[in-house]
Image (tube, grey):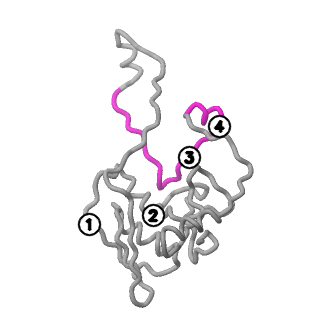
Amino acid sequence: FVSASDIPGENNCDSNIGVPTEYIEPVFADTTVVYYGQPIGLIVADTQAHAEEAAKMVNIQYTNIQTPIITIQEAINAQSFFPEPNDALKVDPIVSGDVESGFSQSDHVFTGFVESPSQYHFHMETQQCVVVPEEDGRLTMHVSTQYPSLVQGTVASVLAMPESHITVGLKRVGGSYGAKILRSTII
């Protein structure tokens, strides 16, 4: 069982510039689990049967279990908001025309709100990664990613090794709706 304490480098799979410290995502949860399904460790085994048997031996005790915030209204009620982005993440609003003038000149104005249930984006191809150990502690990685240099930098940081010792290769990637830009680092 490999856990956060076994990571030789930084326990961080979110190496995007400008992400507030409190929102950096660890490779493995250490003392706090913040969402359902968050990785807490990795079983390494020689067979599927051994891996399944080892997984049954992992015992996690959860405390301070809170009701999940699922909807925007629940987030508003709980005053649960993301912080204002720092300068690296700030986006200037795009304003086109005079909204107030447009409403005042309209024959009909409808007010209210529209709610849409959550969506699950289904990838046309799965996330995957195959790592081949090479000479001198180097790694060759075959990853389904849209951002190979981010994978290379993140893996180098987590494993505390130079980026020049990690080669990331891939064929074509498609149908990922952006999830293979950032989510591939945790794979």
Question: Mark 2 or mark 3: which comes first in sequence?
Answer: 3
The residue pinned by badge 4 equals 79
Secondary structure of the residue carrying numbered label 1:
loop
Cα–Cα gap, marks 2 and 1: 17 Å
**Within 10 angstroms of label 2, few (less than 14), some, or many (20 or more) residues?**
some
Cα–Cα gap, marks 4 and 2: 32 Å
Residue furthest to the left in view is 172
The residue pinned by badge 2 equals 187
The magenta-colored residue range is: 72-97
Magenta stretch prevailing secondary structure: loop
Q: Which amino acid does label 3 sit on?
A: Glu
**Within 10 angstroms of label 4, few (less than 14), some, or many (20 or more) residues?**
few
Locate residue 48, reporting x and y percent.
48, 68
Locate residue 136, reporting x and y percent.
43, 90
**Within 10 angstroms of label 3, few (less than 14), some, or many (20 or more) residues?**
few
The residue mark sitting in front, 1 or 4, is 1
Locate residue 96, reporting x and y percent.
34, 32
Q: What residue type is labelled 1?
A: Lys
Secondary structure of the residue carrying numbered label 3:
loop
Q: Which mark is residue 171?
A: 1
Cα–Cα gap, marks 4 and 3: 14 Å
The residue mark sitting in front, 4 or 2, is 2
Residue furthest to the bottom in view is 136
**Within 10 angstroms of label 1, few (less than 14), some, or many (20 or more) residues?**
few
Question: Mark 1 or mark 3: which comes first in sequence?
Answer: 3
